[in-house]
Every structure is written in C-alpha cells, then in structure tokens.
Amino acid sequence: MPIGAALAHAGESERRDGTFERADFTYDHEADADVCPAGKDLRPRQKTYRTPRTLADTDGLIHYRASTLDCAPCPLKPRCCPNTPARKVPRSLHEGARDLARALAATDAYATSRRERKKVAMLLAMLLAHLKRILRLDRLRLRGPNGARDEFHLAAAQNLRKLAKPIPVPEPRPA
C-alpha cells in the first residue's frame, strides 16, 4: 500500500518535512474540491476522458490535484509542494462519513453519551463476571448453537430475577 494511502486510511496527515498537511486543506462538499491554503481548488480530475473512468483507485482513494498553472506562481509553493510541480491530496471515499463523525465527536452531547456508555460497559462487565463466577457460566455445558442460546436464556432469566426484586423507593424529604 502506498504511503499516501496508509495515511489516508489511518486518518493521519502529519508531515515531517514542514510542508502543509491534509488538515490545512479544506474540503468543499458542494464543489467536490479541496481548497488549498492559498484558496485554489484541487479537483479529482483535471482532464475529461471519452470513456468515463472511476475517480477512486484500488485503495478507495480519490486524488485531488491542483493545476500546475495555479501552483507555479503561488507564493506558498515552497511550503506546499517544493519537490513536485503541483500538489496532490488523497481523500478517502468515506471521508464524508469521517467528517460527520469528527463533527459529532466535538459536541457536548457526544461527551455526555461517552460518559454514559462507559457506565453501561462497566455494568455489563459486572453482570458478565457474576454470570461466570456465581452462575458458573465460565464454560458452556450444552453443545452447539442451540445449547449456547439456551444457556444464555437461562442466564437472562437470572438477570430478570434480579430486576424483579423490589427497589426501595426513596422517602420524600420534608421541604
């Protein structure tokens, strides 16, 4: 796998040579173009073909390319593409979903949801430990998928038994 593909798949875009990273380029969804720090568009294809071709390569990447006519006179060229005539930025086919996930992860609701999910995961771990230690479900005794299903149904019945215990209602405090 080429280095650019590995970086695009991992979501990493850090460059060690001091040139602009992928994060410095903004994606315009309506125009289907990356915009460089100088404000020029990078398009997925610079020329038109007689027979239609797919934009993505075998790694699932679309390569957005700048025009050589835009890059040559640009004052940012030494920081953008010092060794090539024009800049090329790989972008995954699934980058739109990744952008949406990054936007959601930056919200307060996501942080709250994340905290609550940790609590649920801890509760499930405790229940699983109870099943393994107290109910001795550390090893399935019945064979086959149907046997495993039956044993887990019995374990679920044990959990329902726990839920059926009366939960004490807190007494109201005088105002």
Image: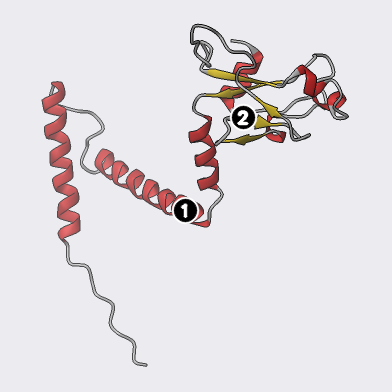
Q: Quadrant of the rendered structure where residue 144 is?
A: top left
Q: Quadrant of the C terminus?
A: bottom left
Q: Which residue is mark 2?
A: 33
Q: Choose between 33 and 158: the one closer to the eye.
A: 33
Q: Which residue is mark 1?
A: 115
Q: Is residue 9 above or below residue 150?
A: above
Q: Quadrant of the rendered structure where residue 87 is?
A: top right
Residue lying farthest front? Answer: 50
Image side of residue 32 versus residue 128, left or right: right
Which amino acid type corresponds to the residue marked 2 in the rendered image? Ala
Instruction: Give how far across and how far down residue 31 sits, in percent.
Output: 58, 33
Which amino acid type corresponds to the residue marked 1 in the rendered image? Arg
- Residue at image location 17% in from the left, 44% down from the top: 156
What distance separates the C-alpha of mark 2 from that of mark 1? 37 Å
Instruction: Give how far across and how far down residue 62 sits, in percent.
Output: 57, 19
Image side of residue 164 versus residue 39, left or right: left
Q: Say what secondary structure mark 2 lies in.
A: strand
